[in-house]
Image (cartoon, grey):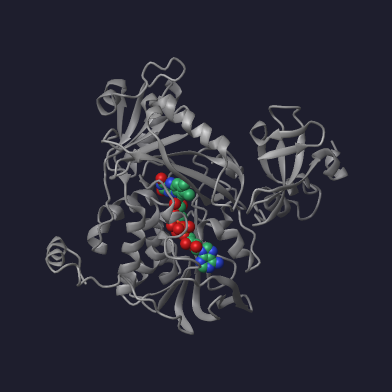
Amino acid sequence: MIINHPLLGPRDAAEFTYLGDASLLARPDWQSETAAGDFDAWLHLRDNPAGEHRELWFHEQGDRSWLIVTRNTLTHEITGVEMARDGAPARGTDT
Amino acid sequence: MRYSGFRVIMEGLRGNTGWQPVWREPDPKPEYDIIIIGGGGHGLATAHYLAGTHGITNVAVLEKGWLGSGNAGRNTTIVRSNYLLPDNQPFYELSMKLWEGLEQDLNYNAMMSQRGIVNLFHSDAQRDAAVRRGNAMLMAGADAVLLDQDGIRRMCPWLDYDNARFPIHGGLLQPRAGTARHDAVVWGYARAADARGVDLIQNCEVTGFHIEGGTCRGVETTRGPIRAQKVAACVAGSSSRLMSQAGMRLPIESHVLQAFVSEGLKPVLPGVVTFGAGHLYISQSDKGGLVFGGNLDGYNSYAQRGNLPVVEDVCEGAMALMPMIGRARLLRMWGGVMDMSMDGSPFICKTHIDGLYFNGGWCYGGFKATPGSGYCYAHLLATDQPHPVAGAFRLDRFTRGAPIDEKGEGAQPNLH
Ligand SMILES: Cc1cc2nc3c(=O)[nH]c(=O)nc-3n(C[C@H](O)[C@H](O)[C@H](O)COP(=O)(O)OP(=O)(O)OC[C@H]3O[C@@H](n4cnc5c(N)ncnc54)[C@H](O)[C@@H]3O)c2cc1C
């Protein structure tokens, strides 16, 4: 598979490591009443779709940026690549 | 029809005209006591033990393709019970014992071959881990032998003992482990279940569930609706897709695992050997082909085929372990879709929907579990109580903070 890096152009997928569903960026609110259940679901449950999947890839052997790749899990075809920092919800930057 | 050596000779003399189809091809009835979704090894084993052990025969197995068209027909056939954790090892040892009596139970030659598995270690730390694992196995009633380098040399003189980076210090041997012929296991269970009256319905995909007031009362299929008292999902790599029809999200990701087989060679491998410095397991089939595999490709996939980086990685591991493999030609390679769970361990449990049961999350280790999984799933379906050795295989174990993480990797399915 070739991942078309927004900054570096086409790169071999072997340069990257894979984390999983991009919804992992949407970390639950720890102050919410339902935080315990929210964190359990966030950490453990997955949609795991057959078809289009937005997912996190880390360019470990390259510029060490996180990318959100849109890929079809039935065909491995990649239809979109963006920088994760552009797609991440603003709240995720809280310290 | 009972199979025997005598029967083979008689049929040979009669021009093999007396053999009959191994199972019936019934149309689905409108209602069953229990519907099993998925005609892989686990689904068919469940049907066999429901009928044989619990006397429940008004059962259908619904399979979207042909029996054994999923992972049951794609795996590298390793059977072992060398687990560590107390929630796992007794289950796999029960499965191992069922394997040992399987052919007599099914009256079918599954080519079960107990030639042993040896897990090599290459450092002091790995040796300590092997000792600990061996002790855990012995405590669960399994067999384990610690071998030093000479012991390994006697078994496999042609491994690369001079590898400066990964010297082979020894290995943990389970003599009762081995391999079985995967298709024959499927056919044997199918034949035995069919003979007791279970309907095996192929080309019948489940497309939805009938859920009324929190109770599952049947399924929608490509061959029409079928009602049932109990519905038992057992679809391995398709688990998330199927259970999403019941509104469930599972602690599972689907990943592709590849396998490889070389041209047929004279006997070189006594049993199964695994490399401890990379991920590689290798055995030799009865036809002589070297059967081997390694890591997952590492990203979500339903494609049943993998990509080239993992081919390279697996072949590098094979070369590092036994350089002579470089002279063998690769005959075939293929992939299967694994139901990778969040802790690498499986599920055999009820769901929050009454009458709907779930079996899955077998990762790449479910072939060895086939008899045990069928046995324990049948127990759960028949009695509504978990079998004692499978009591921890529940979907809610993450919520309770009680994962069964053999490898200690955390909730990262592609690392298990
Ligand atoms: C390359 C590879 C190597 C492996 N090596 C080993 C090994 O050495 N040792 C080991 O122990 N395990 C191994 N495994 C794992 C093992 O094969 C699986 O864990 C096990 O086969 C899963 O159980 P099963 O046989 O019931 O699955 P499957 O055979 O996949 O059965 C599931 C069935 O459900 C059907 N199905 C899916 N959706 C539907 C639907 N909606 N309606 C009706 N039917 C449906 C599918 O068509 C399929 O036939 C390996 C797997 C692979 C892919």
Where is residue B38 shown, x and y percent of the image? Answer: 48, 65
Q: Is residue A64 above or below residue B114?
A: above
Q: Is residue B130 above or below residue A69?
A: above
Residue found 47% across the figure and 17% down from its top? B165
Where is residue A12 shown, x and y percent of the image? Answer: 67, 34
Nearer to us in this view, B113 or B124: B113
Left or right placement of residue B225 versus residue B325 in this view: right
Where is residue B105 shown, x and y percent of the image? Answer: 25, 62
Determine the residue located farthest toward the bottom in the rendered image.
B30
- Residue B87 visible, this angle: no
Q: Would you identify the image quadrant in which residue B116 lies? A: top left
Determine the residue located farthest toward the front in the rendered image.
B15
Where is residue B274 shown, x and y percent of the image? Answer: 40, 33
Residue found 49% across the figure and 75% down from its top? B230
Determine the residue located farthest toward the right in the rendered image.
A90
Residue found 19% across the figure and 67% down from its top? B16
Q: Would you identify the image quadrant in which residue B291 lies? A: top left
Left or right placement of residue B17 versus residue B244 in this view: left
Q: Would you identify the image quadrant in which residue B270 lies? A: top left
Locate the N terminus of chain A and report the quarter of the image it occupies.
Answer: top right
Nearer to us in this view, A26 or A53: A53
Locate the C terminus of chain A and report the quarter of the image it occupies.
Answer: top right
